[in-house]
Amino acid sequence: MSDRQPPQPSWDDQIDADVESSLADMATIAVVGLSPNPERTSHRVTAYMQQHGYRIVPINPVAAGEEILGERVYASVAEAQAARPDLEIDTVNVFRRSVDTDRPIADAIAARDGGVRTVWLQLGIVNRDGLRAAREAGLRAIEDRCLMVEHRRLVSTDQVR
């Protein structure tokens, strides 16, 4: 009899698994750092997800109270959850510089009782320590991946929810 533990999946393998399971049950996405500028990546990616049937909740403290992509903008995930208790945000998608992701990750962890299951850092955005904390709190944690690219890769581009 051996006391060996089975090997743990690598960080990248865990991210791959989290991408697949997140896309399988994603419905409502809070987008931290969503820009009102249609030329910005955050706007294009979010518009794509909205066009494919996902509910979008814009999070941008500078634009709070305004509308982006036809949706009211909130200053934080907590504010959105308080204002819309009927809306279960399951994913927090982050478009902020890596050094500015600790707060959105902490907000996603704090929001898990309200339904958040995934924190997703977009392509080029990494925060391994923050995402370890998210995983320890029971969230799926993804970094350095584009939600639109992964959706196109894993979900039929013709499929609208």
Image: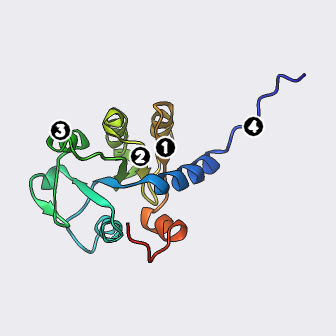
Q: Which mark is residue 155?
A: none
- Contact (Cβ within 8 Å) of mark 4 with mark 3: no
Q: Give how far apart the Cα atoms at labels 4 and 1 are.
A: 19 Å
Q: Which mark is residue 119?
A: 2
Q: Secondary structure at mark 2?
A: strand
Q: Nearer the viewer, residue 81 or 67?
A: 81
Lower position in the chain sequence, tag 2 or tag 1:
2
Q: Secondary structure at mark 1?
A: strand
Residue at x 35%, y 52% (from the top left corner): 94
Check the picture and name the quadrant holding the N terminus: top right
Residue mark closest to the camera, 3 vs 2: 3
Q: Which residue corresponds to mark 1?
A: 140
Q: Nearer the viewer, residue 34 or 83?
A: 83
In the rendered structure, which amino acid carries the disc numbered 4? Pro
Residue mark closest to the camera, 4 vs 3: 3
Q: Which mark is residue 82?
A: 3
Residue 36 pos. (x, y %)? 19, 66
Residue 24 pos. (x, y %)? 49, 56
In this picture, is 132 found above or below 122?
above
Residue at x 24%, y 47% (from the top left corner): 87
Q: Residues within 10 Å of mark 4 (few under 14, many from 20)?
A: few
Q: Which residue corresponds to mark 4?
A: 7
- Contact (Cβ within 8 Å) of mark 4 with mark 1: no
- Contact (Cβ within 8 Å) of mark 2 with mark 1: yes
In the rendered structure, which amino acid carries the disc numbered 3? Ala
Q: Quadrant of residue 49?
A: bottom left
Residue placed furthest toward the left = 65
Residue at x 30%, y 66% (from the top left corner): 50
Q: Give how far apart the Cα atoms at labels 3 and 2 are.
A: 19 Å
Lower position in the chain sequence, tag 3 or tag 2:
3
